[in-house]
Every structure is written in structure tokens, then in C-alpha cells.
Amino acid sequence: MSEQERTPDERLPSQRGGQGEAIRVQRGMFGVGNGGDTSGYGGLVRTVRLPGASSRPYGGWFDEVADELEGALEEQGLVPENAIEKTVVDRGEITFHIAREHLPRVARTLRDDPALRFELCTGVSGVHFEGDKGRELHAVYHLRSITHNRLIRLEVSAPDSDPHVPSIVDVYPTNDWHERETYDFFGLIFDGHPALTRIFMPADWQGHPQRKDYPLGGIPVEYKGAQIPAPDQRRSYT
Amino acid sequence: MSTPRASARDTTEGTVYTVTGGDWDEIAEAAKRADDERIIVNMGPQHPSTHGVLRLILEIDGETVTEARCGIGYLHTGIEKNLEFRNWTQGTTFVTRMDYLTSFYNETAYCMGVERLLGIEDQVPDRATIVRVMLMELNRISSHLVCIATGGMELGATTIMIYGIRDREMILDLYELITGLRLNHAYIRPGGLAQDLPPGAVDAVREFVKKMRKNLPEYDKLATGNPIFKGRLQDVGYLDLAGCMALGATGPILRAAGLPHDLRKSQPYCGYETYDFDVPTADTCDSYGRFLIRLEEMRQSLRIVEQCLDRLEPGPVMVADKKIAWPAQLALGPDGLGNSLDHIKKIMGTSMEALIHHFKLVTEGFRVPPGQVYVAVESPKGELGVHVVSDGGTRPYRVHFRDPSFTNLQSMAAMCEGGQVADVIVAVASIDPVMGGVDR
């Protein structure tokens, strides 16, 4: 699509209000942890933030979905601001950050409301933001509407100290295995799941392997006479 | 007296018999002694996916399956975790190994995710996109061929298997010619391709399309109208539209339920909106409908491959941005494929800045601005979605693959329960699960 073809709303980037969540602090120029930054900028300290909340208009059909969702939640006697913590429009995708206790209601509304009709859930993906204090564990859902040909993202978060998120298996049965996977790898407990057991790791496995505090593991290997350290021990630049 | 083929051992859950075929007398005896008719069977291996990596747990009452469950995780290799310890470019080497029968889809979806995060989707050269589409469609044919071949083999129709593997071999030869490898390629890279098509590749693909056009009707002759084949597949593995939606089943399973949902049409990527092809559907909701759809999709893929060949124009296959593009062009040297001698001469002899740039990009990689994206492509098995999260570093912060095999395999219970034991084999084959993708 060329610039001229777009409507004015779509051409304007939606306004950013407020800052995004801080997820980590970058130190130095190159992000090497073990010294060796000889650039002279080794003392740089920079906070890395995710894209922040957007304010209206979001552009394109995003506003329509947001209006419909807010309207439908109001009809059910819910204050939309309580359920939808913030809305982020970034890289042409829209993300609704949902308060975890309202997730099942929001998911059901998104599925059943004729103007929304997100029939297909593509599962849940866990993300562990160690640096996002108080909301370390994120569960990310992508919902697809075949009727309206749209895709949105829901994101809920839970602190490490209370890793509970309501299950939406009774709204989207497909999430059965997906929630088991996220539980297995991140330790997120989906309350209300019919049988929340490990799915990939053995039943007696200790820990949740895809959390950031879980080491990758590995052993050094010899290659052409040199010792190559395990992947998580190698020099890295982040 | 014959040696017992069914050895028994006692466990905490009851007596476990290991049956290796032939003699069922002991099982029948034991079943008679037991106070209920219920037998729990670990079925298989019968599908190539079930050799040690997929466990089918069936509760049977006579010949009827009353409960069916999958045990998965035996092929979990931690690819998603490993990606977080490699730079963005190295990621393709890992993702290509997830669903190893649809490796180009994994690579393309991952690279499209990285490109969207970088904001360079529009800068990927046309030639690279066309080659991606061509390889993906060839990949669709080879994946469907494996599905049909192994599905036939499980029914005892070994001719279909031989035919399928024979035709797939031609595609693997094309992969080998183009990428150097037959199964796991790491050929598609963030920003474009690892290298251009080699000389002769276009002619070889054209030759293949011609041969494949001739071979495809053989499957029709062998199977489509075959009464035994139809008898085994029709009305087996039934899953209607409501079931597909609830269970998230996509791909041929969904299209066999009558919904022409194909991401190539509904959410076109890689310029699919400019190609001329049809989305086949069936309204039978069964394994036979899925078979017919796969067959027709191969025909449509051949059409797309031909259109790709007609569109190929000489040009770059990597973004122009030197901060993202791999610094060296690969060239064939006396010791195999590696950095071209010209490039080495330049960085070692004439330009210190080029050397620094090469060193930084290769050891450190490029940085990707923080954020998250979800990119989905229509793989032969359904919606392959990739959720990529960046924290602004040189490595992915989190990559999650929504593999269609994983989601579709969930529908096994819905398809099999209440049916016959023999139909489980057909139903699982019609799902086309690849455990490399399921377990990742």
C-alpha cells in the first residue's frame, strides 16, 4: 500500500502516551557483561522500555474493535478502564493489556460479540520479563477473527510471587495444550484448567525451563584444539 | 508349544503385556480373567511419527476406542530456549529444525518476524521474496507427499508410499541444488536469503514442474477412486467446523470442513495476493476430504511455482542495509562453501573499517528495537504463527512457535473416540503430525 492510498488516520502514527514498561537496564556501549568495553562509553546506563501505551485514535479498524470491546464490556456492567489496563499499537499490531481477573470475561466477549467474533485463538505464549518488577510473567494470546479478517493480541501479566492467571480453556478449548505448555515452561498456573500437568517435560521435572532464571545448561566442547564454552557461558553482547 | 510372544510383567498399575504381534492368546486369556472389559493400549508404532516420539494411549472396549490420549514431549529439544542464546541470524539454523518437513515455512515465518521488528519488511528485495514463495510452495508439495505416502503405507498401500517418496526425492534434490542441504537449510535469513539461486536452478525447477505434472495423476489413479482406499478413509476422523474452531484446527483439516480459510488469501504475505491460485475445500469433514485437499493443493502449488519462475528477475537477494545484511558473500572454494576470497582480500588487505564491520556483525550481530510481533504463514499443516519478542538486544528475548501440528494433534481425541481401533491410524495420519514441530 503506497502512502497516498492510506486514509489520513492510518498514515499518522498513533500517539504515544506514557512510557512503556522498563524491562532491563543496558550498561556500556556493547552490552558485554565481563568488562572489555574499551570504547570509552563503558559507563553508559540506559533503561530499555517496551513500546508504551497508545492513545486514540489507534488508526484503521483498531478503533472499531476497541470501541466494540469497550461497549460490550460496559453492557455487562464492567468498567472498561478496569479490564483494559492499556492499549499498545506498535508495528501495525494492536495489543490489549488485560487485568488478569477480567481475562475470561474479555475473551468470551471477544469470541461471542457479533461485531468482534474472534473465533480462533492461536494459543498462549509465555514471556518472562525478569526486569518488569511486579509483573514478571506475561501470557500473550493472539486471537483471530475469520469473520472480520482481523488479528489482535491480549496480554496479561502476573508477578513471580503469585503466578496465577485464569484459564480460558472453557472459552477456547484449543488452549488446553497451550496452557499446559506455558505452565510447563514458565510455571504460570492457569486457574480453572481441567488438568494442568506438564506436557513436554517429564512429570517429575524440577523447575520451569524457559524462565530466564533457569540456565540453558551445556558443557564446553573441544573444537580444533580449543575449548568452546557452553552457549550460555560464551561472551555475549546484549 | 510355541514361545510366548506376549510377555507379562506386574506393575503398580496392573499387569502390563508387551505384544509384539502374532500371538494374542495370552492377552485374550488375561482379558477373560479380568473383572472388567476395559483394556488400555499403548498403540503403535504405526505412523513414522509414532516411533518412540508419539505415544497413543487408547482405552478400548472390544474394537471400540472409548478414550484416546496423546503422550507427547519425547522429541522436545528446547529450540525456543536455545534461540535466546544465539544472535538473530543464527536463529534460522535452529527454527529450520522444528517441523523438519516444513523447514522453509519455519525459516520464512521467523525471518518475517525479525524483519517486522526491524521495520524493514518493505526493503526485502523482490527476488528474495519470490524465491521464498517458490521454496515454500515446493515445500508444501514435499510435505503433502510425505503425508500421503506415509498415510498410504499405514493402510498397507505401499505403492503410494513408493510413489510419494519418489516424487519427494526430486524436490529434495532441488533443495540440495539451491541451498546445499536436503532437509534443514537455514537458507532464508533476516533481510533476504543466504545466497542467490545457483546457475541452472531455474531450469531444474521448470523440469521438476513438468515431471510432477505428469506424476500427480498417478495418485488419482491409485487412490482417489480406489474403493478400498475410500472405504478406509471416508467418514473416518470426522471433525466438523465447530470442532475445528473450538480446537483451533487449521489447514487441510479446517478446509475439509468446508471453510476456505487460507492465510495466503485472507492475510497475504510475501506478495501472495499477486499470485493466481485456488483454495480447495471439501465438505466431508473426514480423512478422505483432507486427502483430496492435499492432492489439489499440490496442483495449486505447482501453479504458484511456475508463476514464481516467470517473475524472477536478476537482482539482489539481501537488504541493502549493511548493518543487517551478512557482510560476506558466500563462494565455493577448494575447501567448500565459505567467505569469498575477494571479500577476505578486502577486509584483510585494504579496509580496516570493513574488517571491523565484518567482525562486529558476525560476532555481535545486529540489534533489534524492543517490542513484539506475531507473524503467521499458511504452512502445509495450517497456521504457523511466530511470536517474537525483542528487548533491544542482539539476541531474541523470546521466540514462540505456534506450530500447527501441535494444535491439530489435540483434535486426535475428538476424531478417534467412539470409533474403531483401526480408524485411529487413519485419523492420526490425516492430521499429519510431525513431532519435531509438536515438541520443538
Image (cartoon, grey):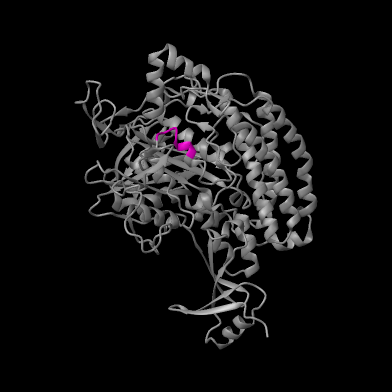
Q: Position of residue B430 (x, y in %)?
A: 63, 56
**Residue furthest toward the left?**
A43
Locate residue A125 relative to residue B257 in the image: left or right: left
Front position in the image: B385 or B257: B385
Q: Position of residue A149 (x, y in %)?
A: 51, 39
Q: Position of residue B364 (x, y in %)?
A: 36, 29
- Position above or below: B199 against B74: above
The quadrant in which residue B400 appears is top left
The answer to whether residue A67 of the structure is visible from this angle is: no
Q: Position of residue A17 (x, y in %)?
A: 26, 30
Front position in the image: B333 or A105: B333
- Position above or below: A194 against A66: below
- Position above or below: B209 against B261: above
User: Which residue corresponds to the image point at 70% horizontal and 50% vertical from the top-left?
Assistant: B292
Q: Was residue B157 drawn as part of the magenta stretch in this picture?
A: no
The quadrant in which residue B349 appears is top left
Q: Quadrant of the C terminus of chain A?
A: top left
State which region is magenta: B87-93
The quadrant in which residue A32 appears is top left
Locate residue A114 relative to residue B207 in the image: left or right: left
User: Which residue corresponds to the image point at 56% horizontal and 88% vertical from the top-left?
Assistant: B33
Locate residue B195 relative to residue A139 in the image: left or right: right
